[in-house]
Image (tube, rainbow, N blue to C red):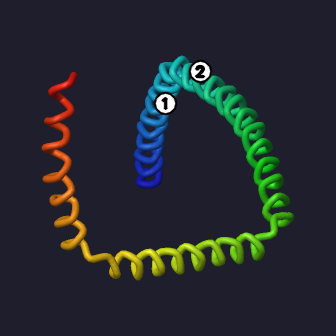
Amino acid sequence: MEENKKMTAFARWQCIFTAVAAVCCVGVFAVVLTMVPQVRAVAGQLETVLTDLETVTGTLNGELDTILTNLDTVTRELAAADLEGMVADVDAFVTTGQSAVEQATEKLSIIDFETMNRAIADLADVVEPLARFFNVFN
């Protein structure tokens, strides 16, 4: 009898747990059914994003090919250029310019600007009366 009571108690608990499991399964099934449209919408958006990504990737590949071609062209042109000769020419140009500036500075330092300004002022004093004299005949 004791054994039957225990088995009955276990059977009741088993029945209760089976009912709870069934309710949980129904609840999970209901949640899954409500999520199916949302999952489909997300799948559609994911497909659109993947299509856009393929388009962008294709565009980028074309642009990268153009960039690599241009880079290759520039690299070949730089390799063919006589950079050492160009640097030597620029160096010679700078050296020539520097010596010309030094010569001009030396010549300007020889000029006596005070005397030259006085001479210009004296010339203006002499020319002014002559200019007034000739303006009388105009």
Mark 1 residue type: Val
Query: Which is nearer the eye, 12 or 80?
Result: 80
Q: Amino acid at mark 2?
A: Arg
Asked whether the residues under the numbered discs 2 and 1 touch, taking CB atoms below 8 Å apart as contact, a structural biologist would say: no
Q: Quadrant of residue 94?
A: bottom right
48 up-or-down from 94: above or below:
above
Q: Which residue is mark 1?
A: 28
Q: Mark 2 against mark 1, which lies toward the viewer?
A: 2
- Mark closest to the chain's N terminus, 2 or 1: 1
Q: Residues within 10 Å of mark 1 (few under 14, many from 20)?
A: few
* Residue 73 as seen in the image, left or right of residue 16: right
**Quadrant the C terminus occupies:** top left
Q: CA distance from mark 2 to mark 1?
A: 18 Å
In this view, the residue in front, 24 or 7, is 24
| Residue 72, horizontal then vertical, whole percent | 82, 55
Q: Residue at x 83, y 66 (%)?
A: 79
Q: Residue at x 13, y 53 (%)?
A: 125
The residue indicated by pointer 2 is 40
Q: Residue at x 81, y 69 (%)?
A: 82
Q: Residue 122 vs residue 14: left or right?
A: left
**Which labelled disc corresponds to residue 118?**
none
Residue 81: image x %, image y %?
81, 64
Describe the element under mark 2 as helix, strand or loop.
helix
* Quarter residue 12 falls in: top left
Q: Nearer the viewer, residue 5 or 94?
A: 94
Residue name at image x 52 percent, y 78 percent: 98
